[in-house]
Image (cartoon, coloured by chain):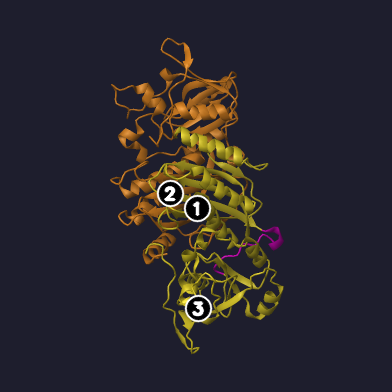
Chain colours: A orange, B yellow
Amino acid sequence: MSLDELALIRALQAAHPAPPGMLGIGDDCCVWQPQGAVCLSTDAIVEGRHFTAADPPSLVGRKAAAAALSDIAAMGALPTGAVVALCCPGRWDALAIMEGLGAELARHRCPLLGGDTTASDRLVIAVTVWGEGDPEAKRRLVTRHGGRPGDLLVVTGPLGGSLRSGRHLRPEPRLAEGRWLARQAAVHAMMDLSDGLAGDARKLAEASGCGLLLLPEQVPVHEDVPPLSDTVTAALCDGEDYELLVAVEPGMWPTLQLAWPFAQPLSVVGWLLAEPGAWMEDRQRRRVPLTLRGYEHRD
Amino acid sequence: MSLDELALIRALQAAHPAPPGMLGIGDDCCVWQPQGAVCLSTDAIVEGRHFTAADPPSLVGRKAAAAALSDIAAMGALPTGAVVALCCPGRWDALAIMEGLGAELARHRCPLLGGDTTASDRLVIAVTVWGEGDPEAKRRLVTRHGGRPGDLLVVTGPLGGSLRSGRHLRPEPRLAEGRWLARQAAVHAMMDLSDGLAGDARKLAEASGCGLLLLPEQVPVHEDVPPLSDTVTAALCDGEDYELLVAVEPGMWPTLQLAWPFAQPLSVVGWLLAEPGAWMEDRQRRRVPLTLRGYEHRD
């Protein structure tokens, strides 16, 4: 550990005192006392893949936290803690990164309880965040595998254009929406959309043992998608939307839609099928194979 | 997500089925049901800092897991789960890395429950591992801050030469030793030695609100330290030993030493003091300021 590293840890320790009953930054481990089942996710963002050397450090830190929190939203859980592994070159402002990251966690009342810092040639931030089921949802955690044939596939907001517009640096984890959805018996399965609807919907369908029919013409296209481009492909394939994809009992959909208390409306984008395979409706409403794939960061 | 990445995730899912009652690889989060307080640590290793491009991928994976597990050992806990963020260039064999990592976790009965894979220019592996207090130790978790003035400082094995010899690629997390120590009322504080005794002992003393006196001549020197080198400095400063450092009630030390059931003997290496400051005994048994520092990866 270098003196710089020690100074950074002391600054973080001062900025993030552990909440009562928890052990935070500065020991071999953090310690907390969960109330029931714990859900946990780890998410890394890498310079040159998920952000560039020109992006503001505080936004990069914010993105690292928000992308990880989105996985907690996808379970319908309350975030209860986070740790960060920061692999940081000298040319990046580690403190500014951690300020952006800490502010995003604080915005969602998630304490930062520990981490690891190390030097590196390229900036890599791996955030691990965990949460617990909301007492108001009887501590339910919503997985990807509860979908049933005939369920409607619903998204919480418009999709596409996130990378081109720079919106991907300011993702909005749908934590309140996720918790509300976890309280509804009509919701059978849920996940967050990070790799594009075309790829992610396959994952939910597969985990639920179902086939899939997407309705591209009904997918809400984000205003960040340029108007004269192939807007449907953008909405299905761009990735980094961080909206939620939900499988909903069809008979309860009208009631759910009416009760939905958030500004951004829910949109039906497809169906789960009893028969295997991934399909979409073309403009003539014919069922054709879904050949579009999600966004690939490796490309 | 690329097709390579999807194939890797499917291989990992097949190799690491979730234990009963847990949700493992393949959802937005893993889920488990803790029995009491949870201790958790995240630890990143970076190509060119903690290992080289020439090191075998399976050993690099093993090191990533072992270094993280050592933090669980330092709390005296039982490991109960792990996730990994793998940032992997195409020139590294991701499957071999994960085999080494998975085998090390399996050796300590710690299930791999999830992760994140992404492309990267340099290999970075961030492992998050968590555990729970051992029922046989009344679920006690041992922190760094319980040390008292007058406590003996004790280490679980010889120190030094880890990086030069390549031993750093095969660290042995002292999990059984840590759990045994957590059962002893004589043990007031504990941590693992990753940055060298000279630096790490300061951290334990500071967390405990104590001063520190090290006895360099009594520090057990590892056989990996070359015989004609400055062996004491090596033992105090080399880093990556992954032995445990323990603060022990002095009156109970003879009984503890007698009861110690492990092959490698415990060694007294210093004292916690009521007065502040970090000191060492020189060869003439005079108390002089401790100027040696721990190992710095950033150098």
Evaluate whether residue B128 shows in this view: yes
Evaluate whether residue B26 shows in this view: no
Closer to the camera in the image, A79 or B31: B31
Q: Position of residue B294 (x, y in %)?
A: 44, 70
For the residue carrying disc 3, how many other residues have a C-alpha within 10 Å: few (<14), some (14-19), or many (20+)? Answer: many
Q: Earlier in the sequence, mark 3 or mark 2?
A: 2
Q: CA distance from mark 3 to mark 1?
A: 35 Å
SS type, badge 3: strand
Determine whether A68 is above or below A241 in the image: below
Q: Contact (CB < 8 A) between labels 2 and 1? A: yes
Q: Amino acid at mark 2?
A: Leu
Highlighted range, magenta: B134-145
Determine whether A151 is above or below B177 in the image: above
Residue corresponding to mark 2? B123
Closer to the camera in the image, B17 or B33: B17
Residue corresponding to mark 1? B60
Q: Amino acid at mark 1?
A: Val
Q: Contact (CB < 8 A) between labels 3 and 1? A: no
SS type, badge 1: helix
Identify the residue at horizontal 39%, vertical 26% (top origin): A235
- Which quadrant is home to the N terminus of chain A? bottom left
Instruction: Tell me which chain the residue with mark 3 is part of.
Output: B
SS type, badge 2: loop
Number of marks in the image? 3
Identify the residue at horizontal 61%, vertical 42% (top origin): B16
Residue corresponding to mark 3? B212
- Which quadrant is home to the C terminus of chain A? top left
Q: Which picture quadrant has residue A186?
A: top right
Q: Position of residue A194 (x, y in %)?
A: 44, 35
In this rendering, position of residue A97 left or right of residue B161: left
For the residue carrying disc 1, how many other residues have a C-alpha within 10 Å: few (<14), some (14-19), or many (20+)? Answer: many
